[in-house]
Amino acid sequence: MKETTSKAANTLLDIIPEGEENAVSMKFLSAICETDERTIRKAIFDLRCSGAIIAGTSAGYYIPVTEQELKDYYTMARSRALSTFRSLKAVRADLKQRGLDPD
């Protein structure tokens, strides 16, 4: 992680609240961390890849505490990932048709 992203990540772990009812906006996180939203998104991505469970909804970001919050976040994130893969299906087929290895 870049130093700014790392610094933001450490701050985020301290300020992202538990529970959907306490979710905080990207704008709030950006202001508290004194950095741009792109850095916040990258830091949240890095934290998630490191095992942190940080849910993001239209309400904002939060740490899921109930089974329902965890399930809701999983369902939403899985749906988003599957949608991305479905949209790549045509690109993959085109690459193969051109004799290129898509993987």
Image (cartoon, helix red, strand yellow):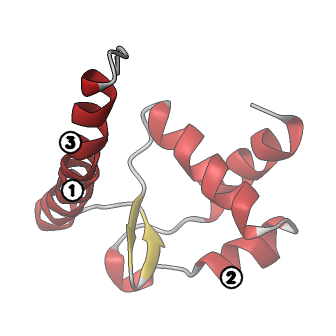
The image quadrant of residue 35 is bottom right
Could you say whether the residue bearing mark 3 is in a helix, strand or loop? helix
- Picture coordinates of residue 36, whole percent (x, y): 81, 67
Q: Nearer the viewer, residue 50 or 14?
A: 50
- Picture coordinates of residue 79, whole percent (x, y): 17, 58
Neighbour tally class for label 2: few under 14, some 14-19, many 20 plus, Cα within 10 Å: some
Q: Is residue 46 above or below residue 64?
A: above
Kindly report which numbered mark, 1 or 2, lies closer to the viewer in this rendering. 1
What kind of residue is marked 1?
Ser
Could you say whether the residue bearing mark 1 is in a helix, strand or loop? helix
What's the residue at 33%, 28% (across, down)? 95
Neighbour tally class for label 3: few under 14, some 14-19, many 20 plus, Cα within 10 Å: few
Q: Are marks 1 and 2 in contact (CB under 8 Å)?
A: no
Q: Is residue 23 above or below residue 67?
A: below
Q: Are marks 3 and 1 in contact (CB under 8 Å)?
A: no
What kind of residue is marked 2?
Lys
Q: Which residue is mark 2?
A: 27
Query: Residue at the front extreme?
Result: 98
Q: Residue 1 bears which disc, if any?
A: none
Answer left or right for 66 relative to 8: left
Answer left or right for 29 relative to 92: right
Q: Nearer the viewer, residue 92 or 52?
A: 92
Query: Looking at the image, is mark 1 or mark 2 earlier in the sequence?
Result: 2
Neighbour tally class for label 1: few under 14, some 14-19, many 20 plus, Cα within 10 Å: few
Q: Nearer the viewer, residue 83 or 9?
A: 83
Q: Is residue 46 above or below residue 62?
A: above
Q: Quadrant of the N terminus?
A: top right
Q: Residue 89 bears which disc, if any?
A: 3
Q: Which residue is mark 1?
A: 83
